[in-house]
Image (cartoon, rainbow, N blue to C red):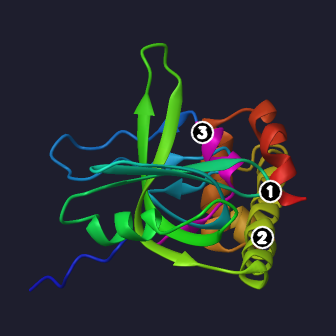
Amino acid sequence: MMGPKKREPAKWIFAKELKDCTVIEEKDPEEKGKPYVITPLGTRVKRVLFTGTVTSKNSEENLTKVAVSDATGTFYVNAFANDFNIEQKAALDSLEADTTVTIMGRINPFRTDDGVYYFNVNPEMVSRSDSIAADFWNLRAAYVAKRKLYAIREAMKGNIMEEDNLTKLGYSSEEAADAIRAKESYGEDDFQSVREVAQ
């Protein structure tokens, strides 16, 4: 007997890492839900967790849109007034500009006719935060990004294409997999563009 399906873990990533994504993983047409997004740091992600400051809000009867900025860019958060999102919409409606907030939600990718990707987040958890929580999130997210950049740098040396080669250097299996995925999916210019997230 199969147990309940595990929820996809939320990834700690900066807004710029999500914004710079150009790769969406193909999925089985019968598979439900949104596809995985592959970021320039190799993160394979459907769900994100981030902390930032509310910079704008547009609230209507059926939809609330909130922009939340971190040190690298902006996440765009949308909550609809349906049974699934009603509590999250109410939470977004209660926010004011300059509020510090932590949000966990699912990434919703949108591709324009000319091939440009945009991403918004459908929230599953909205929580007011403070400067201490924001500082912790920034430090941890930067540490995660920096480790991935170091692993990518190693993967780019020579012909390292095996995860085992990276784990032997002290990287976790996830960091190794992300580095190989980044090397296969993106070029050197893409890594340079997100290098600032780890500063």
- How crowded pointer 2 is (Cα within 10 Å; few <14, some 14-19, many 20+) is rated as many
- Quick one: which residue is furthest to the left in this view? 1
Between 144 and 91, which is closer to the camera in this rendering? 91
> Mark 3 near mark 2, Cβ–Cβ under 8 Å?
no
Q: Which residue is mark 3?
A: 21
Q: Amino acid at mark 3?
A: Cys
> Mark 2 near mark 1, Cβ–Cβ under 8 Å?
yes
Between 52 and 190, which is closer to the camera in this rendering? 52
Q: Amino acid at mark 1?
A: Ala
The numbered mark, 1 or 3, whose residue comes first in the sequence reads: 3
Circle 3: element type: loop
Could you tell me residue 44's position as x and y percent?
Answer: 52, 55
Does residue 130 appear to the left or right of 84 in the view shown? right
Q: Which residue is mark 2?
A: 138
Between 98 and 184, which is closer to the camera in this rendering? 98
Q: Is residue 41 visible?
A: no
Give the alpha-carbon distance from disc 1 to disc 3, as whole Å: 18 Å
**In the rendered image of this protein, does residue 173 appear above or below residue 195?**
below
Q: Amino acid at mark 2?
A: Asn
Could you tell me residue 187's position as x and y percent?
Answer: 73, 32
Q: Which residue is mark 1?
A: 71
Give the alpha-carbon distance from disc 2 to disc 1, as whole Å: 8 Å
